Image: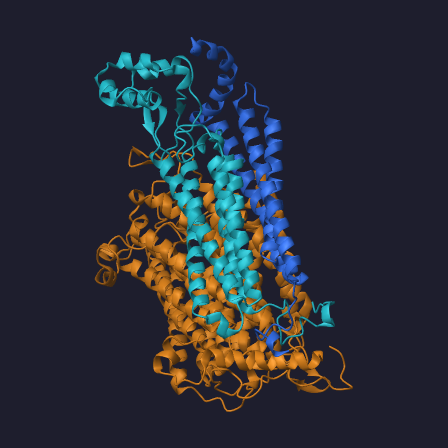
Chain colours: A blue, B cyan, C orange
Amino acid sequence: MSQHIISPEITFHTEHSDADFKSRVRKTTILLSVITIIELGIGLLIYNIHKGENPNHTLVLMFKGAVCILTLAKAYYIVSVFMHLGDEIRNMIMTIVVPLMLFIWFIFAFIYDGNSYKNLRNTYDKHFQESAVEKQEKKAEAPAAKPGGKE
Amino acid sequence: MATTATAHQTKWWSGGKSPFNMEYGKLMMWYFLMSDAFTFGAFLISYGSIRFSQNFWADPNVVFNAFPGAGHANLPLAFVSVMTFILIISSVTMVLAVHAGHKGDKAGVTKWIAWTIVGGLAFLSCQAWEWHHLITGEHAVLVDGHVELIGQTMRANPWGKLVEGQAVVDALKNTSHDNLVSLVSMHDHTTSHDVLSAMSNDALINKLDVAELHIREKGPVAFGGYFYGITGFHGFHVFSGVVINIIMLIMTQKNVFEKKGHYLMIEKAGLYWHFVDLVWVFVFLCFYLI
Amino acid sequence: MSEAMHTTSAVSAAHGEHHDEHHGHHKETFITKYIFSQDHKTIAKQFLITGIVWAFIGGLFSVLFRLQLGYPDTKFPILETLFGHWAAGGQITPEFYYALVTMHGTVLVFFVLTAGLSGTFANLLIPLQIGARDMASPFLNMLSYWFFFGASIVMLSSLFIQTGPAAGGWTIYPPLSALGEASIGSKAGMDMWLIGMALFIVSSLLGGLNYISTILNMRTKGMSMTRLPLPIWAMFFTAVLGVLSFPVLLSGAILLLFDRNLGTSFFLSDIVVNGQVLPNEGGSAILFQHLFWFLGHPEVYIILLPAMGMVSEILSVNSRKPIFGYMAMLGSMFAICILAFLVWAHHMFVTGLNPFLGSVFVLLTLLIAVPSAIKVFNWLTTLWRGNIRFTPAALFSIGFVSLFISGGLTGIFLGNSTIDIHLHDTMFVVAHFHIVMGVASFFGMFAGVYHWYPKMFGRYLNNTLGYIHFWVTMIGAYLIFWPMHYEGLAGMPRRYLDKRGWVSFSQFGDLDKMITVVTVIVFAVQLLFIFNFFYSIFKGRKVTTQNPWGANTLEWTTPIRPGHGNWAGEIPEVHRWPYDYAKDGRDFIPQTEPVGANESAH
């Protein structure tokens, strides 16, 4: 019994079988790699959409959302398997996960206010507004300008 | 509050023991990482806030398209994927080191920690190369009606909107001789620098293919600050992780953990290392993918 | 294997081994005992005494700028003697005034009411009240103090440099704080402010992690979470708040350092200084305010919660009644802890924040009134029909409740974004936060010092001086801050050096003089307290009984002057909650007493 008490506060230890553990690590590694490759693929896809004549912004946004979800999945596997949080007592998991909920409001409020700052300046700041207006004009001009450049 | 866990019918919260069956050091490490997550979170969320407050943002696929030894080839995201895989692999070796520690396998710990250190150093080298490339690489930018060559620094961003057509032709006429020479030599590797220097401005402009120039306006300044700030802060974490791992390696070699009877220190170092990997997942998302 | 045996051995191992491991039997020198001590009680005293030194400095600053506000026409030659060109002609210069206001806020909010308050009492009370030999990691605990000391040195030395300390207000809003050319208070003093705060954040992080893991892991046998005395719960939530919110300030401070020294544009955009256009572009000053207040608001509760916890304990002990609504107290502290993270932008209603977002923040802010009201109700009902002993500690606790009510009510005004348009940055705000967070927390701290002084030093503070201290401070605090509400409602701005130019404020001239006079008197009485504190360490009346207040909690089961390790023998086991006062015909039943067969439930 005594060899189990490595630290006074700990009363027992859960042991994994070696083979079990190794296969879990292998599976997670493959999963993380596959997700990363999919993410890179989507990144390149976005790049090609942007290169095209009329980028479809909704589609780009959807792809970006997909990447975010995939990243959260990756984060879940790293924390749960590599950091062994999944093996801890439920209450311990809660003390980590619940405070992370604060990020929801943290992110939403900051982004919302950043966006609002942009709208404010586009409305009241002529100089700042130019950068938005030009973009629209460019898009209309772009097809006409291209053949001219190639001559 | 006094929750009764099912395992062993233990009253976890009744005092006299850890309610999470976890020694205090590991608990402190977890909560430290929570705290650090808020530091990184604040950085990344600030970045998001600024990005949403801009009408235009640089496309990461355009910014990060270089690969060591590949010259000017356009390889978007290639290098960063190498960096990402290095970090994932080093995380796996760290898991194995922690596992070896659980079994009290000194040789295993030594081997896997050493590989983790190698992975960390490789990542840092990659980052050094990337920074160096971004800072020293020159890009043609339209400034006040003429073309200038600037790199990606904290104060300037060369990846604004593409300028096309007549504006480029006009800008080239107002561009200084030296900048034109550099501009031509970027695309023409056969003619020597001296020969180009001797040519007139008009001759130099004639050598340029306006459609291939990719001249841009100045981009959002905050891009550089956030990129160097956040990847730098992450790199600092990787660096300190490597230092911690080296200390762990030395302590393992000196049988410190053997004498203690447990390798819990390795577990804590492992938590820190995985956290560094975790942060990279989000840095990767925010700067390279979206 | 038998579970019971297992746990017993684990417990004895827990405390025995832990004790030996860290503090062995080696001979203690002066340095290991008093300077680089790892004993939580000594570290608590170090925090307290450093905090007192800082409180003296910060308080003195307020006296200096109150002189200017109350007597803008009078010259005080002694000021020129003391401060040279900062007070040329015996009058405080604008730069000096801003530096004083900034450092008064910084010092009192962070160095006194954060480090001095929770640093002192978390360190002192957590191991003693949960039944532990020391903190989970005594070494990191020591580091926590020395990082605080380092932060203090940096902040203190910034007072003595050529260009003076930071002077952009304690909230250090950029662009002012980011541009050295805009104000001398934004030159080197500002860098030192940021570095000092970075060290401070490290200190608070080390402390906070220690408090959390100690409370979770090191509780003695029987001390379940719901048997914890309320100060411990308060310290726990305080530590959680600190651990999760200080890093955000750290991020903001790092970005600001970059803006100041590396030419980045995180917070700067479209700025002209002295007719010169700056190249910075694309940053957002509002972003910094978001980052600052993401810490800044929880900070208010970091300051207030320990005071709340200690007051709950002291009120219960001194009214000889169980605390009313223990679980409601926990629930409301938990609710406050969560809401503290969600309401930060109510400090920013008029700074360009999106009004719709602002209205959500109004809603969340007003929700805080609910747990606050629950707490006030519980304190009053604890006192209700109690057998109150008016010790100085009890008086300060009652004073705390009074201040918390009057300061909290004005918070409802300010939490409404529409009313805030009128009241923002007026003396009304100054009155509000000084009463509810400044003076109230100070009262909690004083209550704690008077109550646990016997445990810290084995002697009592002088009671007569204590009563003088209380009454003058209590009446003085209201005399100082109550009139400021009227000034603020009339529109008088805060942070202004000289308001004589406005006819509308001329009626307040005499009122400002009165406030200044009272400030000087209250400051003098605090000096009396400091005298009492240091005098009593050596000459105070000695404590002769182990449990002088007749309290239930574990710290009173230790020897009168506990050594390192707190209990001479085994750590006592806990059998009941800490508030069994006036129960079954007994005055008090300590936590260590097993529950009797016929005992009524609480």
In the depicted structure, whether residue C75 falls above or below residue B3: above
Residue C585: tell me if it is visible: yes
Quadrant (top left/top right/bottom left/bottom right) for the N terminus of chain C: bottom right
Q: Position of residue B143 (x, y in %)?
A: 34, 24
* Closer to the camera in the image, C220 or A115: C220
Q: Quadrant of residue C408?
A: bottom right
Quadrant (top left/top right/bottom left/bottom right) for the C terminus of chain C: bottom right
Q: How many numbered marks are there?
A: 0
Q: Quadrant of residue A1?
A: bottom right
Look at 64% across and 73% down and name the residue there: A11
Q: Position of residue C370 (x, y in %)?
A: 65, 57
In this rendering, position of residue C598 left or right of residue A39: right
Look at 32% across and 25% down and name the residue there: B148
* Closer to the camera in the image, C318 or A134: A134
Q: Residue furthest bottom?
A: C544
In the depicted structure, whether residue C467 falls above or below residue B222: below
Q: Position of residue C113 (x, y in %)?
A: 46, 64
* Closer to the camera in the image, A53 or C452: A53
Residue C235: tell me if it is visible: no
Q: Residue furthest front?
A: B107
Q: Position of residue C334 (x, y in %)?
A: 63, 61
